[in-house]
Image (cartoon, coloured by chain):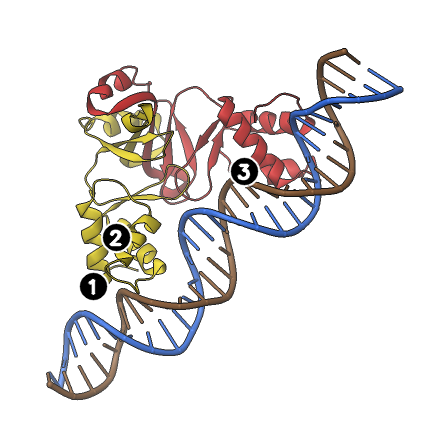
Chain colours: A yellow, B red, C blue, D brown
Amino acid sequence: MAVTKHSKQRDAIIDELCQRHDHPTAEELYLALKMKMPNLSLGTVYRNLNMLSDDGTIQKISVGGADHFDGNAGNHYHMLCSECKRLYDVAYPVLEDIEKNAVNFVDGKITSHMITFIGVCNGCLH
Amino acid sequence: MAVTKHSKQRDAIIDELCQRHDHPTAEELYLALKMKMPNLSLGTVYRNLNMLSDDGTIQKISVGGADHFDGNAGNHYHMLCSECKRLYDVAYPVLEDIEKNAVNFVDGKITSHMITFIGVCNGCLH
DNA sequence: ATAATAATAGTAACAATTATCATTATTGAT
DNA sequence: ATCAATAATGATAATTGTTACTATTATTAT
């Protein structure tokens, strides 16, 4: 089901997600928002995050364990720290041709691509 | 815990996984193997798949929903069909320099990278 | 053959997510 | 502004995917 009406809760979810630069899970977002909206429901957070990522307003990222969400819907890449499991943005220039080039290696059509680097973040190295 | 002894079950799991070119989930693998080993346990399949992917013998791939497993541990790329959620190999040449180049955009060290194309496979297009 | 111990089957527990449903909020038309 | 239609919510139950537990079985080194 697509987004039609809007609500205080949805606005707050989008707001919080766009303000932060980490890539919170639904529960992390819920806990942060619950402080300002004490009777916010976890189901509402999940429902909205799903609708918004279906819309293409935000991104859902699956890397094992709980899904992460990213308020930046534009194509960009990520790094997953294998120690702390945090997800970081990687400002590597988007490979503009990769989808076009990949067509030769795929039986079907390509709509997008994701690149995830796996490594260890500075916080976990020190 | 690392793999030390070996077992009929583990051999069958590796065998089945390497024989197929799809990227089955633990449960898909379990159902296939159960026909030949009727008292195989789902927990055994999970335990072995985890030990083997920790080892680097196989790959675990998270793209939302149940994890997929790949008997080919060498670096290569995948495509996820957004319709049927099946995962395909993509024989796109590995970008040998991308990790080295990405260092400038990351606070930490990089150990590997993954590329996943999202699209619609031929089976779902027709 | 035996002892040590890793691996198993079966099941319970757990974590993440989705579904349900009665109530509340938002919207567009009057 | 009021009202009807309906989308969204909160609370909770249900489901799905995965891990943990434990008694038993299989594998391995001696």
- The crowd level at tag 1 (other Cα within 10 Å; few <14, some 14-19, many 20+) is few
Q: The disc numbered 3 marks a residue on which chain?
A: B
Q: Is any part of residue B38 visible from this angle? A: no
Q: Which residue is mark 3?
A: B26
Query: Which chain is indicated by disc 2?
Result: A
Q: Residue at x 63, y 35 (%)?
A: B33
Quadrant of the rendered image containing residue A115: top left
Check disc 3 and give the amino acid type: Ala
Q: What amino acid is labelled 1 in the image?
A: Lys
Residue identifier under label 2:
A52
Report the mark closest to the observer, 2 or 1: 1
Viewer-closest of B124 and B38: B38
How many residues crowd mark 2 within 10 Å: few (<14), some (14–19), many (20+)? some
* B42 relative position to A44: left or right: right
Residue A70: x and y, percent? 25, 43
- Give the answer, above or below, for where A51 lies relative to B99: below
Indicate the amino acid at tag 2.
Leu
Name the quarter where the C terminus of chain B is drawn. Answer: top left
Residue at image x 19%, y 58%?
A11
**Dot 1 corresponds to which residue?**
A8
| Residue A126 image offset from top left, x and y in percent | 30, 23
Residue displayed at 25% across by 62% down:
A37
Eyeballing the image, is A88 above or below C13? Answer: above
